[in-house]
C-alpha cells in the first residue's frame, strides 16, 4: 500500500515536471499563460480608467437667443459632462454634425422659448442624443435634466412671495431626496465592467493555453505528449493531477495578480477579505483548469482554440449576469451559463471585492464552483482514459502492422 502510494506521488510529480517543461518550451502556451494575464488586464483597465465620459461635445440650435436660453446653454457648458462645441443656424446643420460624429447630441431651443416663459406659460427644450454610445447619452441627458431642474427652481422662487430661504427650499423641493451610489461609488464604467472582465480573463487564458497545448500535440501527431504511454502514465488520476498541478501553480500567482494587484493599480473599488477571496478563487481556478482540460479534447488543430475562445468570450460575459440582468436572460441560456465556471466566479468575485460580501453571502456560487470542480474532474478523467485507450490501440496496431510488413519482406526474400 505504501509502495503504491509512493509510486503514485512519484508518477504525479513526473507528469507535473514534464508538463511544466512543455509549457515553458512552447512559446504560444507561455504567451497565453504568462504574458496575456499580465498585460491584458492592464490594457483593459487603462482604457476604462477615466470611468465616466467628460466634455461630451454637443451642438446648440438657439432660435430664441434670449436671456434665459443663453443661461441654459451657459450652465450646460459649465457642467463637467457636456461641452457646447458648435452653435448652428439650423437643425439640419446640427444633424450633419451628428452624422459625421463631430458631436454626440443637439440642444434645440425654439423661437418662442423666452416669450412663453415671460407670459408664465410652459416652454420646452428639445434634446437629441446619439444613442450609439450610452455613456455619451447619459452625460448629455443627465446634464440637461439637472440644468432644467435648477432653472425651474429659480423661476419658482422668483414668482413666489416667500420671505425666507427655508420657504424657497420647501417650494422648490417639497420632497427632498439624497442620492447614494452603493458599491460603485464613482458611478464609473470601469468599476462596473472591469471586475467581470478580470475574472473572465483567467478562464479564457486557461482555455487558450491548455487547448493550444492539446492542439499542438494532435497537429504534430504526438500522441505520447497528449496521453503518453509509459510506466508513469498507468493511472488516469496521475495524469490529470499531474497536468492540473502544473496549471494550478501558474494560475495561483496569476489569479492573485489579476484580482488583487490590478484593481489597486488603477484605483478600482476593491474591499475583499483576503481569506474569503482566497476561498472563492481556489475552486474557481480549479474549475477553470478542469473545464479547460475537458474542452481541450475537442481541439484538433492549434488554431481552433483561438477561434473558440474569441467566439465565446462576449457571450460568457453576458451570461455571467453582471453586464446584463440574469432575470432577463432566456431560460435556455441560463442553463448553459450554469455549465461555465466564469458565471459563478464573476458573480462571487464582484460581491466579495466590490460589495464587501463575505463567503457566507456567496454560498451558492461557492458550492456551485466546487460542484463544477468535481464534475469536470471526473469528465476529464473519462475523456483522458478514452484517449489513452485509443492511443494504446493505435500503438498496438502500428506494431502489428510493422511486424506484418517485416514478415512479408522476409518471405519475399
Image: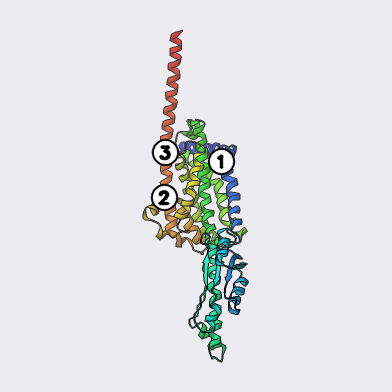
**Nearer to the camera, 296 or 301:** 301
Which element is circle 3 on?
Answer: helix
Q: Earlier in the sequence, mark 2 or mark 1?
A: 1
Q: How many neighbours does mark 3 have within 10 angstroms: few (below 14), some (14-19), or many (20 or more)? A: some
On screen, residue 389 above or below 321: above
Q: Which residue is mark 2?
A: 339
Instruction: Tell me the distance, in whole angstroms, between the alpha carbons under discs 2 and 1.
Output: 25 Å
Q: Which residue is mark 1?
A: 29
Locate residue 105 relative to residue 383 in the image: left or right. Answer: right
Q: Categorize mark 2 by other alpha carbons within 10 Å: few (<14), some (14-19), many (20+).
A: some
- Say left or right for 253 vs 338: right
Q: Check if mark 1's residue and mark 3's residue have beta carbons within 8 Å.
A: no
Location of residue 52 (image quadrant): bottom right
- What is the tally of numbered marks visible in this picture? 3
* Nearest to N terminus: mark 1 or mark 3: 1
Within 10 Å of disc 1 (Cα), the crowding (few <14, some 14-19, many 20+) is many
Tag 2 near tag 1, CB within 8 Å: no
- Please state which of the two labelled residues, at mark 2 or mark 3, is closer to the viewer: 2
- Indicate the position of residue 387 as horizontal and vertical percent values: 43, 34
Q: CA distance from mark 1 to mark 3?
A: 22 Å
Q: Is residue 98 visible?
A: yes
Residue topped by disc 3? 383
Q: Tell whether 374 sits left or right of 213.
A: left
Indicate whether 130 appears above or below 295. Answer: below
Amino acid at each position: 500500500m505504501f509502495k503504491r502510494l509512493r509510486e503514485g506521488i512519484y508518477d504525479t510529480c513526473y507528469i507535473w515536471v514534464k508538463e511544466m517543461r512543455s509549457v515553458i518550451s512552447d512559446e504560444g502556451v507561455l504567451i497565453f499563460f504568462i504574458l496575456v494575464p499580465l498585460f491584458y488586464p492592464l490594457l483593459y483597465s487603462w482604457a476604462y480608467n477615466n470611468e465616466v465620459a467628460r466634455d461630451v461635445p454637443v451642438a446648440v440650435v438657439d432660435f430664441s437667443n434670449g436671456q434665459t436660453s443663453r443661461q441654459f446653454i451657459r450652465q450646460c457648458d459649465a457642467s463637467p459632462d457636456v461641452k457646447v462645441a458648435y452653435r448652428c443656424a439650423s437643425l439640419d446643420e446640427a444633424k450633419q454634425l451628428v452624422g459625421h460624429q463631430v458631436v454626440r447630441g443637439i440642444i434645440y431651443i425654439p423661437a418662442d422659448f423666452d416669450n412663453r416663459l415671460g407670459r408664465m406659460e410652459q416652454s420646452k427644450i428639445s434634446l437629441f442624443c446619439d444613442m450609439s454610445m450610452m455613456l455619451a447619452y447619459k452625460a448629455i441627458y443627465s446634464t440637461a435634466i439637472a440644468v432644467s431642474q435648477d432653472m425651474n427652481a429659480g423661476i419658482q422662487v422668483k414668482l413666489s412671495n416667500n420671505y425666507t430661504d427655508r420657504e424657497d427650499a420647501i417650494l422648490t423641493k417639497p420632497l427632498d431626496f439624497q442620492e447614494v451610489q452603493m458599491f460603485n461609488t464613482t458611478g464609473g464604467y470601469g468599476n462596473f465592467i472591469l471586475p467581470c472582465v478580470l475574472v473572465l480573463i483567467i478562464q479564457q487564458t486557461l482555455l487558450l493555453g491548455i487547448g493550444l497545448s492539446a492542439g499542438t500535440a494532435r497537429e504534430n501527431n504526438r500522441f505520447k505528449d497528449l496521453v503518453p504511454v509509459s510506466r508513469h502514465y498507468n493511472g488516469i488520476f496521475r495524469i490529470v493531477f499531474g497536468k492540473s498541478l502544473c496549471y494550478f501553480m501558474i494560475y495561483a500567482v496569476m489569479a492573485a495578480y489579476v484580482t488583487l494587484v490590478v484593481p489597486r493599480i488603477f484605483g478600482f473599488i476593491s474591499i475583499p477579505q483576503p481569506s474569503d477571496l482566497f476561498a472563492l478563487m481556489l475552486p474557481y481556478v480549479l474549475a477553470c483548469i478542469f473545464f479547460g482540460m475537458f474542452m481541450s479534447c475537442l481541439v484538433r488543430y492549434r488554431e481552433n482554440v483561438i477561434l473558440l475562445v474569441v467566439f465565446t468570450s462576449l457571450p460568457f460575459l453576458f451570461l455571467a449576469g453582471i453586464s446584463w440582468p440574469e432575470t432577463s436572460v432566456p431560460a435556455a441560456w441560463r442553463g448553459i451559463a450554469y455549465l461555465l465556471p466564469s458565471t459563478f466566479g464573476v458573480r462571487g468575485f464582484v460581491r466579495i471585492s466590490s460589495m464587501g460580501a463575505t463567503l457566507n453571502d456567496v454560498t451558492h456560487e461557492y458550492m456551485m464552483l466546487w460542484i463544477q470542480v468535481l464534475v469536470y474532474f471526473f469528465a476529464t478523467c473519462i475523456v483522458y482514459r478514452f484517449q489513452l485507450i485509443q492511443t494504446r490501440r493505435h500503438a498496438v496496431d502500428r506494431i502489428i502492422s510493422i511486424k506484418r510488413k517485416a514478415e512479408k519482406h522476409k518471405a519475399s526474400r
